[in-house]
Image: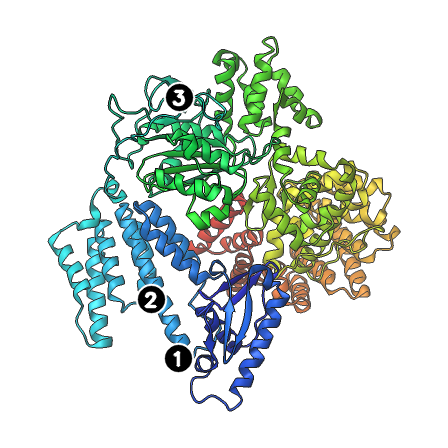
């Protein structure tokens, strides 16, 4: 649940916004939210709801709105979120956690931005704060005087934030970005002098001095004309600075913006831990800070650590005779490769005050290796030492007790065993106290939840905490401003470099293609690559190609990626065992999806649930990095995760497949009906068809066509899976239901998919299906220039349609056959078939098919040099079709009318109609129609505009846009 004031006043829930009703109810909610957790009197609410004298029944109206709000909140399970609307005497209070209110989150982000030492981090916080705004504050409410004041105050805060963000951009030297940001706001608030002044300075520092001076003079004139005043000191000072050529304070070198270098803190004076203390949480040997070797990104060992990141000041090591700094870090990872961007991101994240850096990603992606690599490279930054604990959040051995981890840390910091407190709160307090004046690195590996991490955070402003987790730990981001560094799989080149680091470059260079194939089969997952390398290292006579061939078989791939106690399946199993049962069930069903992407509707169809439940499960899986959200509402599984998911519930494979096939049919039917309301490509559903619990709605043709285009690849994979499973009645329907997109993009390599549909139709011995597929396939082949093949197929289609008692299918088949016959020179036969198709369409009362037939008949009359007949047919067709639903067809008919007028000697009318045809096609995105009309225009006109539009349409077709 989320309350929004920064835009339209609303209450967002998992199922969408609550229907708040009239503006006065929104005003009431806004007034309560602006004073959340504080009583608001009836008098105050009355002022918010009425501008002038309130009606005598104002109290009753308010009580009615309160009652309705309570009902709406209860229906949205508000109590589970800690939300309640309470009556307190003559007042009401809306109790809600501040995190649910966008205006409170806005203020928190501003506060965090002010605390950042570096402008880059401030920019991130300020951009996040401004992204919460979705329009003018308190929109949709009746703005009584108190609410108008509140809305103005919120807007002032927003504008001040915009100015602050522009200054942060300037501190980074990104003056063009500052100018772009301020230009838009200045246009909306031309009389705000502080905005204009900031814009002038940004333009000037971006090298656009003349624009900066012009902005001053325009603002000066506007102030004089509108308000009768001269510019204030901000504008005047900015103007004077530009005239003097003074760069101003924000043009200093960007690194200075990171804040003053903190003074070096004296090393700890405490004694090192005794050797007789409890066993080390790190579970490995120690490594002296700054000593030994480190591994570069390419895996090459060097004699000294890499230099510190420029945002960090260099810190001198402890002098001789002082206690040695504590170091619990395991050794640096061997054979580390790539990750330059992530290492740099960690350095940026660690540059703030008391930062918490959060490395997240799926099992086996190399989170621990990255954290340790960064920690060893940057050891000089932490003169007081480095602590490490494996929290085993995803281990079969279970998590260590917090008191044990704290005891290990305290002993390492020199606390006597007898002085270690017995309770977790006391031990944590002592840990924070001891670290308050130190410069320590604390690495918390494999954390499962935010609460565990919070207890182990050090107290010093100069301490850095580095956390790794398979979960996103959003609670830690919210409470402690943890800065996430998400870790993805390796690119193919980095994957092969990792193999070379283990196997030796000679072996990899001897089989470069096989090495790349292995990297791809391992999905760029470092754990899988290391297991693969281990198998090959132990078998020097094996070739890389041999193992690649074995891994190519999906049925055994996970087994091959296990070695001893290490493997992909084991790592994934540890992640899955901590998930709720609903998320595990959803993951198991996702493994049986034949495509690559999922939305909540497809996920629900697979799992036998509803989209709301499916989306919640997908969010849980995404938080555990088992699925990835590639776009809003669209998720994807890593290949190895998909194979593991499939193994969780193999018996449900067919049930899940049928569920997703019927989902595809239902959604494609809805898309086709929205895109082409007059069409009916396959309305007879399979006998055992199961309608999904919910089917996606499409607002208009554009949205429906966008879905068909986006889902094309997954629909093809789904149809192929149906064919392989013997579900041919689903396969041909899923393919044929894409007919609006097929007709729209006829030359877009559809024939292989339609040939698969033809195989399915024939396997079903269904003349209706075979006729429909043949008709569409014949059309596509005709558009591809394969006219003879099209004719051979289309000869059979009308016969099959008659056999299936499908008169409209016969009419469509006759149309497509006639088009081919006309191209082959058999124009009289083509005209006869078109006349027969018109007769069938009229007999069935189908205006859509009749319009289509008349369109082709008109074109054939034009080809036969009968412009009068062509014009008559085209006009008759135009009279049949609604303009808003037939944009593409109208374009083609207008083009025929234009060409007919030209043939009749009416050049002016012909050019006008052809131009109109081209414009309609361009507006509809029908580039082929635009090209056809513009080519006709260019035959009679040499206008530059026609040539430009023709070339642009051709270019769009070539780009596939």
- The front one of 335 and 823 is 335
Give the left or right position of residue 840, taking residue 7 as reference.
Answer: right
Q: Give the residue at mark 2.
A: 156
Query: Of the residues under marks 2 and 3, which one precedes in the sequence?
Result: 2
Pointer 1 with pointer 3, Cβ within 8 A: no
Q: Give the residue at mark 1.
A: 145
Tell me which corner region of the image, top left, top right, bottom left or bottom right, holds residue 533: top right
Q: Nearer the viewer, mark 1 or mark 3?
A: 3
| Quadrant containing the N terminus in the rendered view | bottom right
SS for dot 3: loop
Q: Give the residue at mark 3.
A: 287
Q: Residue at x 72, y 59 (%)?
A: 679
Query: Of the residues under marks 2 and 1, which one precedes in the sequence?
Result: 1
Give the left or right position of residue 511, taking residue 375 as reference.
Answer: right
Q: Residue at x 59, y 14 (%)?
A: 536
> Picture coordinates of residue 945 (x, y %)?
43, 56
């Amino acid at each position: 649940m989320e309350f929004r004031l920064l835009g339209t006043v609303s209450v967002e829930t998992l199922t969408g916004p609550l229907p708040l009703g009239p503006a006065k109810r929104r005003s009431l909610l806004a007034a309560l939210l602006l004073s959340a957790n504080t009583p608001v009197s009836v008098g105050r609410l009355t002022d918010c709801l009425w501008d002038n004298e309130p009606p005598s029944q104002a109290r009753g109206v308010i009580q009615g709105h309160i009652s309705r709000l309570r009902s709406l909140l209860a229906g949205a399970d508000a109590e589970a979120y800690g939300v309640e609307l309470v009556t307190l005497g003559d007042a009401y209070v809306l109790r809600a956690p501040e995190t649910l209110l966008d205006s409170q989150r806005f203020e928190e982000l501003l506060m965090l931005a002010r605390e950042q030492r570096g402008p880059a981090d401030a920019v991130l916080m300020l951009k996040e704060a401004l992204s919460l705004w979705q329009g003018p504050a308190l929109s949709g409410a009746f703005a009584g005087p108190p609410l108008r004041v509140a809305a103005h105050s919120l807007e002032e805060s927003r504008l001040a934030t915009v100015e602050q963000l522009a200054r942060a951009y300037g501190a980074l030297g990104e003056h063009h970005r500052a100018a772009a940001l301020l230009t838009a706001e200045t246009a909306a608030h031309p009389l705000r002098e502080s905005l204009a002044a900031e814009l002038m300075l940004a333009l000037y520092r971006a090298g656009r001095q003349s624009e900066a001076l012009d902005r001053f003079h325009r603002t000066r004139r506007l102030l004089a004309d509108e308000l009768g005043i001269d510019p204030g000191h901000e504008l005047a000072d900015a103007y004077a600075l530009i005239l003097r050529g003074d760069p101003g304070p924000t043009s200093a070198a960007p690194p200075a913006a990171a804040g003053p270098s903190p003074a070096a803190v004296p090393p700890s004076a405490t004694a090192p831990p005794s050797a007789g203390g409890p066993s080390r949480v790190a579970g490995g040997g120690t490594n002296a800070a700054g000593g030994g070797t480190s591994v570069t990104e390419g895996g090459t060992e060097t004699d000294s650590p890499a230099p510190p990141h420029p945002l960090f000041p260099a810190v001198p090591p402890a002098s001789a005779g002082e206690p040695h700094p504590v170091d619990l870090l395991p050794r640096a990872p061997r054979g580390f490769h790539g990750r330059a961007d992530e290492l740099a991101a960690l350095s940026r994240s660690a540059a703030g005050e008391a930062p918490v850096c959060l490395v997240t990603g799926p099992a086996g992606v190399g989170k621990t290796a990255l954290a340790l690599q960064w920690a060893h490279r940057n050891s000089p930054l932490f003169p007081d030492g480095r602590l490490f604990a494996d929290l085993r959040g995803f281990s079969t051995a279970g998590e260590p007790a917090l008191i044990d981890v704290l005891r290990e840390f305290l002993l390492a910091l020199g606390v006597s065993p007898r002085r270690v407190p017995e309770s977790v709160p006391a031990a944590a307090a002592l840990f924070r106290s001891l670290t308050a004046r130190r410069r320590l690195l604390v690495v918390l590996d494999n954390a499962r939840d935010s609460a565990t991490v919070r207890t182990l955070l050090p107290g010093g402003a100069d301490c850095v905490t580095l956390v790794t987790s398979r979960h996103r730990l959003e609670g830690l981001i919210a409470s402690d401003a943890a800065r996430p560094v998400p870790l993805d799989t390796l690119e193919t080149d980095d994957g092969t470099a990792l193999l070379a680091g283990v196997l030796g470059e000679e072996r990899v260079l001897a089989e470069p293609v096989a090495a790349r194939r292995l990297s791809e089969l391992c999905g760029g997952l470092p754990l899988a690559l290391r297991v693969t390398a281990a198998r090959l290292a132990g078998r020097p006579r094996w070739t890389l190609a041999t193992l690649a061939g074995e891994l190519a078989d999906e049925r055994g791939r996970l087994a091959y990626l296990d070695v001893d106690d290490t493997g992909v399946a084991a790592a994934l199993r540890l992640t899955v065992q901590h998930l709720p049962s609903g998320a595990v069930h959803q993951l198991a069903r996702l493994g049986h999806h034949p495509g690559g992407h999922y939305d909540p509707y497809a996920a629900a169809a697979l799992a036998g649930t509803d989209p709301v439940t499916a989306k919640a499960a997908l969010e849980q899986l995404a938080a555990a990095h088992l699925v990835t959200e590639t776009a809003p509402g669209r998720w994807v599984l890593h290949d190895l995760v998909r194979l593991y998911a499939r193994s969780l519930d193999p018996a449900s494979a067919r049930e899940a497949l049928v569920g997703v096939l019927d989902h595809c049919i239902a959604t494609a039917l809805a898309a086709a009906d929205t895109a082409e309301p007059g069409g009916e490509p396959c309305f007879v559903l399979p006998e055992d068809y199961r309608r999904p619990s919910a089917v996606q709605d499409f607002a208009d043709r554009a949205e429906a066509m966008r879905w068909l285009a986006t889902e094309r690849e997954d629909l093809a994979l789904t149809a192929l899976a149906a064919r392989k499973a013997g579900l041919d009645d689903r396969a041909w329907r899923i393919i044929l239901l894409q007919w609006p997109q097929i007709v729209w993009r006829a030359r877009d390599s559809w024939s292989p998919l339609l040939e698969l549909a033809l195989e399915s139709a024939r396997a079903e011995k269904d003349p209706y299906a075979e006729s429909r597929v043949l008709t569409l396939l014949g059309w596509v082949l005709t558009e591809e220039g394969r006219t003879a093949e099209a004719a051979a197929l289309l000869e059979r289609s009308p016969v099959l349609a008659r056999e299936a008692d499908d008169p409209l299918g016969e009419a469509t088949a006759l149309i497509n056959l006639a088009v081919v016959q006309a191209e082959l020179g058999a124009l009289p036969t083509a005209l006869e078939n078109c006349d027969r198709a018109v007769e069938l369409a009229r007999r069935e009362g189908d205006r859509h098919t009749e319009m289509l037939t008349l369109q082709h008949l008109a074109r054939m009359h034009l080809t036969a040099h009968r412009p009068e007949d062509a014009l008559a047919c085209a006009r008759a067709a135009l009279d049949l079709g609604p303009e808003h639903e037939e944009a593409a067809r109208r374009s083609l008919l207008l083009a025929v009318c234009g060409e007919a007028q030209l043939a009749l000697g009416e050049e002016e009318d012909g050019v006008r109609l052809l131009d109109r045809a081209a414009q309609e096609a361009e507006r509809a995105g029908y580039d082929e129609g635009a090209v056809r009309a513009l080519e006709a225009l260019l035959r009679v006109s040499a206008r530059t505009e026609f040539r430009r539009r023709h070339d642009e349409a051709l270019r769009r077709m070539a780009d596939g846009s």
